[in-house]
Image (cartoon, helix red, strand yellow):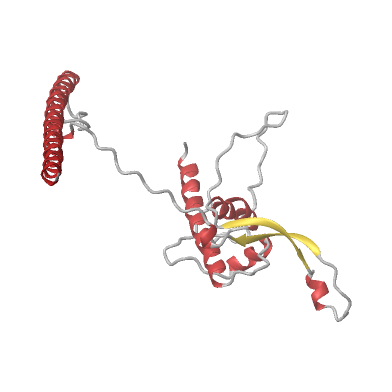
Amino acid sequence: MSLAFTRLTQQKHVAVKEGVAIVRRILARKALPTGYTTQELYKLTLKEAPSAVYEAPERHILPTAPKYTTGGEVLSRTPPPAPPNPNHPVRSIKFLKRDILPVLEGQKELYKTRTERIPQHAKKSKDTAPSPTQTVWVWLPIPFAQRPKPPIPEAPKEVFGVDLGVGEDLSHLSKRRERSRRAKIRRDVHAAKVAAGMKRDRERSRQGAELRGKQALEKKKAERSAGDVAEVGRVVN
């Protein structure tokens, strides 16, 4: 992977992050009930200044294999045109449409839908007759209550034998010492698991004995109570 390609990827990631933040600010400040078209959002984003830490990307043209004429001469290539707004995170409407808005759509913050609108030229007309509408695609924010909740992160799985060396970095050892160390760790872990299993079995046996003792005591109390009731009945009779 070339250095120019790596820089382009990093700069694109930064620009997308800044562009997403700008669109969020616009929607938080004024979210139209009829939504925004991509063109409307693009015009609004250009009025927003990026964060103070944002730096305009340098332009890098990726090297490509030369093309030759039939006579063997190298064809000259015209470099691609620069984006309309190279110093702004939202460098073009294409960048907004293909890279920024899909991020917000994927995070369930926006959705694209069709709606009916009165054209701008019809709004400015003095004609009192009902204006015809046209179908346009707009972006609408999804209410916070309807957005999916982020998944609850699972608790990290406890690894048995960390204190015995499981998971430790052995890359500094030679191959022979590394094999020896791993074998010792396996033996220690096996012995620890056997000891833990024996301890667990003893604890279960102790709990079972306590439970059986309590059940026997309750049974004796119940028998004694039943005998007392029978004795009282004989005395009364």
The image position of residue 167, as x and y in percent, is: 22, 32
The residue closer to the viewer here, 89 or 65, is: 89
> Seen in the image, is 205 located left or right of residue 65?
left
Q: Residue at x 56, y 46 (%)?
A: 61
The image position of residue 174, as x and y in percent, is: 17, 22
- Above or below: residue 119 compared with residue 223: below
The residue closer to the viewer here, 93 or 161, is: 161
The image position of residue 170, as x and y in percent, is: 19, 29
The residue closer to the viewer here, 108 or 95, is: 108
Q: Quadrant of residue 64?
A: top right
Q: Residue furthest front?
A: 237
> Seen in the image, is 140 located left or right of residue 128?
left
Q: Quadrant of residue 227?
A: top left
* Number of residue marks: 0
Q: Residue at x 72, y 28 (%)?
A: 71
- Above or below: residue 31 compared with residue 175: below
Q: Which quadrant is the C terminus positioned in?
A: top left
The image position of residue 231, as x and y in percent, is: 11, 41
Q: Residue at x 13, y 23 (%)?
A: 191
Q: Quadrant of residue 130?
A: bottom right
> Seen in the image, is 109 located left or right of residue 162?
right
- Above or below: residue 236 compared with residue 124: above
- Above or below: residue 39 compared with residue 159: below
